[in-house]
Each structure stands twice: as structure tokens, then as C-alpha cells.
Image (spheres, rainbow, N blue to C red):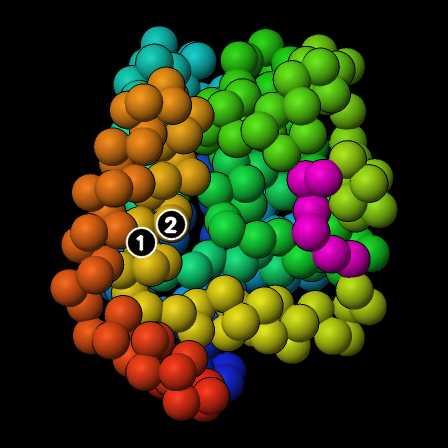
């Protein structure tokens, strides 16, 4: 994996096996550790290498686990790392942008969907790939995708084992933009900077509220909004934002 800084944004590139066999005993802990090492910074762009953003599981390792009778243990190990990571990404103040250079499949699709935004080049693809190998979905894909594209579109995606091109995924709402390959990272960083310019509480609370609205009734959600906006009223970002507005200047939340 490569980690670099571009215009104040951390860019994590999955390379080699981390892109082609992301969810294996070897690579999933490394991916988790790199992301968690940088979580808390203002923004992270995740991308891949060559034809792959993140191709999901190591099928050779799956075959070995079947032969040895420990497939459940392997699946439990992989999801035990991936699922907590996705929850941290969704709840962190850090803005995550997936720069989809190539295929995102299986758990790799979950990684892309867990990001706050998805920018793709024409080579970007989305695939579930679970049905074809006799598995049910994981990685939050059956929770995250219907909220982007609608339940029936997601249902068809899973049961027909579809592969969406970047343009198809964009048309359905699973991808936010499709840009030329040579401007993919630049545009992803630009989006990351735009979305992460606000105060820490604003970002974290907004992500929390958007996550919670899926399970809250309106009355409960209004209480959550009230609690969080009251907390926001005590922050330096609130004081800065009000002063900047009244004095007709751009706020500085850094």
C-alpha cells in the first residue's frame, strides 16, 4: 500500500495483493491498520491500482478453508475486522472519498459504499459477486446500497449478480461522479477538501444523524438533532461561523 498527502488530504492506495485480495488474512489487517492510523485527519481518499479498486476475498484461501473444514472461522475472522472498520468510517469526523479506478467487488464494494462519496473513472466497476460463489452478502452492502439506489434496484443487483460500469452505477446513484482517468485522484481530493472544510463537530454530528435517521422514528431523531445542535452551540466553530457570517468573510474552521 502507498500512503501520500495531496493538498492536505491523505491518499491511501491499495496496491498489489491489497487491491486484488483485499479480504484475506494477510491484507485485511493491513488495510484496517493503515486506515485507522490516519482516521481522525480531515479527509481520506481510498483508491486502488490498475484494474482493481478492491477485488474482495482471496478465493484460493476460501477453497483451502473448505478443504480444511474451517471456512466459518475464516469468514468470522475477515468480517470481524471489516465490519468494525466500516462502522468507524461511517461515524468518524473524517470524510472518506472512494476514488474508483477499477473493480470494487464483495467486501471491496462494502469499502467503497461505506465512504461518504464515490468518484469513478470510466474503468470503475461495481459487483456483488457473492451469489456466484454461493455466499450471501456482507460488508454492509445490503444496508448501504439500497439507501443509495433503492431496494428493488439493489435486489436485482444481488440476485442477477450484476456488474455495473461506472456510468451505470452513476445513473443509478451509487457513484457521485465519473471523471477522466487522469483526473480521478485530483477530483477525489477536491471533493474531500470541500466536504471536510467544516468544523469537527459539524462533520461528525452530521454523519451520525444521517446514519441514525435510518433507524429512528421522527420524534427520536428530533431529540438527537436537538442534543447535537446544543453541543454545537458550545464549540469554537459555532462562534467562528457566526462571526464570519456577520462580518462577511469566509470562516476558518481549521
Left or right side of 142 for 179: right
- Quarter holding the N terminus is bottom left
Query: In the image, residue 84 lies at what x, y percent?
Result: 28, 36
What residue appears at the point 82 percent right and 40 percent down from the top-left corner? 171
Which quadrant of the view contains residue 79? top left
Pointers 1 and 2 in contact (C-beta within 8 Å)? yes
Residue 228 appears anywhere in the view: yes
What residue range appears in magenta?
173-178
Q: Nearer the viewer, residue 89 or 215?
A: 215
Query: In the image, residue 164 lies at what x, y percent?
Result: 79, 35
Query: In the image, residue 238 lies at what x, y percent?
Result: 27, 70
What residue appears at the point 32 percent right and 83 percent down from the top-left corner? 243
Q: Nearer the viewer, residue 234 or 213?
A: 234
Give the Cα separation between the discs numbered 1 and 2.
Answer: 6 Å
Look at mark 1 in the image and give the residue it sits on: 204
Look at mark 2 in the image and give the residue it sits on: 206
The kind of secondary structure element at disc 1 is helix
Q: Is residue 78 above or below residue 238?
A: above
Predominant SS of the magenta segment? loop
Left or right side of 195 for 204: left
**Can residue 191 be found in the magenta stretch?**
no
Which quadrant of the view contains residue 50? bottom right
For label 2, the crowd category at 10 Å Cα-Cα, with few meaning under 14, some 14 to 19 and many 20 or more, is: some
Amino acid at each position: 500500500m502507498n500512503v501520500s498527502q495531496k493538498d492536505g488530504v491523505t491518499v491511501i492506495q491499495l496496491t498489489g495483493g491489497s487491491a486484488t485480495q483485499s479480504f484475506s488474512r494477510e491484507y485485511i489487517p493491513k488495510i484496517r491498520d493503515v486506515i485507522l492510523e490516519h482516521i481522525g485527519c480531515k479527509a481520506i481518499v481510498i483508491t486502488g491500482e490498475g484494474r482493481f479498486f478492491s477485488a474482495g476475498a482471496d478465493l484460493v484461501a476460501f477453497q483451502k478453508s473448505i478443504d480444511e473444514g474451517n471456512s466459518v472461522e475464516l469468514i468470522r475472522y475477515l468480517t470481524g475486522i471489516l465490519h468494525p472498520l466500516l462502522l468507524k468510517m461511517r461515524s468518524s469526523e473524517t470524510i472518506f472519498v472512494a476514488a474508483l479506478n477499477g473493480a470494487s467487488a464483495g467486501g471491496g464494494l462494502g469499502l467503497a459504499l461505506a465512504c461518504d462519496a464515490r468518484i469513478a473513472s470510466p474503468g470503475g466497476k461495481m459487483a456483488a459477486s457473492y451469489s456466484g460463489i454461493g455466499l450471501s452478502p456482507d460488508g454492509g452492502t445490503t444496508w448501504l446500497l439500497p439507501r443509495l439506489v433503492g431496494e428493488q434496484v439493489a435486489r436485482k443487483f444481488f440476485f442477477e449478480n450484476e456488474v455495473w460500469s461506472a456510468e451505470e452505477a452513476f445513473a443509478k446513484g451509487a457513484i457521485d461522479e465519473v471523471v477522466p482517468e487522469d483526473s480521478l485522484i485530483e477530483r477525489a481530493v477536491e471533493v474531500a477538501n470541500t466536504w471536510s472544510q467544516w468544523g469537527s463537530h459539524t462533520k461528525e454530528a452530521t454523519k451520525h444523524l444521517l446514519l441514525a435517521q435510518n433507524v429512528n422514528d421522527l420524534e427520536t431523531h428530533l431529540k438527537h438533532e436537538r442534543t447535537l445542535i446544543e453541543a454545537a452551540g458550545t464549540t469554537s466553530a459555532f462562534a467562528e461561523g457566526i462571526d464570519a457570517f456577520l462580518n462577511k468573510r469566509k470562516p476558518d474552521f481549521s
